[in-house]
Amino acid sequence: MSDVKNYEELLGYAEKIVVEACEVALNPGIDLKVSTKSNRNDLVTAVDKKVEEIIARKLADVTDYPLLGEENHSIDSFDGRVWVLDPIDGTMNYVETHRDYAISLALCEDGVPVLGVVADVVGGKIYTAIRGAGARCNGKELPKVDPERPYSEAVVITDLKEINALPRLIEVLKDSRGHRRYGSAALELVEVASSRAGAFVHLWVSPWDIAAAMLICQETGALVTRLDGTPLDVRHKGSILAGWPTVHSGIHDRLIVQAM
Ligand code: 2AM
Ligand code: CA
């Protein structure tokens, strides 16, 4: 085992491993064997498990950090360095629409993402970030988001499930450019980082859904919190509100502050 410590080197390994895993997702060579988890639309396939196994093995060749993976890898604690992996984020899309799914890999230090890779597998885009050093897409620096672009110019990414749980969202969305939904939290977050969407609202994300993409957002100047505006601790499942600064406060004020 090599003694790999520095972020650039680690990101290089992570990116290479994720790019190789994209080929497996695109050409898995095995039966999908789709099954359900928490509900009929929460899917897992043999490919989710295969991608996770391959990435776990390759990570273990270069570091001895523990791995938290959605399908098969648990950790005792988030202390120190921990890899956090979603082998396929957007499994429903993987099975049904064959696009808009991601491989998401982050390295956390004491529960804080310090580097991240999100692969838009079908779109052929690899988003990366190192804490404090900016975010990139296919190697090219992602420009900062516009901190003053108003809520009225923002497309908001959210879903019927959020609207059902928060009926006020319907009124809030009327002030925006409208809403969209892609079905992969990691890809939805990089839409915000890439300035194509102004905000992303989801009520039930897990660490592996957001660890990498949240850092990519933060490195472009987007704000990432819980829906109520409190800090987001990626170690725990819960809500997320990510957005360009004015759009983040625009949603928070309309949805939370004005409701009080
Ligand atoms: P997944 O595809 O890895 O399960 C879709 O709503 C987005 O939310 C996806 O990023 C999906 O990740 C995530 N998600 C988290 N919990 C989920 C659940 N119980 N059912 C479906 N999607 C879930
Ligand atoms: Ca997944």
Image (tube, rainbow, N blue to C red):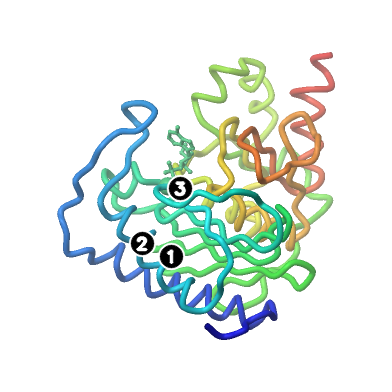
Q: Nearer the viewer, residue 123 or 50?
A: 50
Q: What residue type is labelled 2?
A: Glu
Q: Which residue is drawn at 69% across and 25% down?
A: 172
- Would you place residue 54 above or below residue 249 in this image? below
Give how far across and how far down residue 167 sits, in percent.
Answer: 61, 15
Sequence-earlier tag: 1 or 3: 1
Q: How far apart are marks 1 and 2 (CA)?
A: 5 Å
Residue density around tag 2, few if under 14, some if 14–19, many if 20 or more, within 10 Å = some
In screen coordinates, is 36 left or right of 230?
left
What number is the disc on residue 56? 1
Q: Residue at x 68, y 77 (%)?
A: 7
Q: What residue type is labelled 3?
A: Glu
Quadrant for residue 216, please give it. Answer: bottom right
Question: Which residue is under mark 3?
Answer: 70
Q: Distance between the residues labelled 2 and 3?
A: 11 Å
Q: Distance between the residues labelled 1 and 3?
A: 12 Å
Q: Nearer the viewer, residue 65 or 117?
A: 65
Q: Residue at x 37, y 34 (%)?
A: 42
Quadrant for residue 225, please give it. Answer: top right
Give how far across and how far down residue 100 sits, in percent.
Answer: 40, 52
Residue density around tag 3, few if under 14, some if 14–19, many if 20 or more, within 10 Å = many
Sequence-earlier tag: 2 or 3: 2
Question: Which residue is under mark 2?
Answer: 53
Q: Which amino acid does label 1 sit on?
A: Ala
Q: Residue at x 46, y 78 (%)?
A: 61
Confirm or deny contact between disc 1 and disc 2 (CB under 8 A).
yes
Confirm or deny contact between disc 1 and disc 3 (CB under 8 A).
no
Give how far across and how far down residue 48 sits, in percent.
Answer: 33, 53
User: For the C terminus, which image quadrant?
Assistant: top right
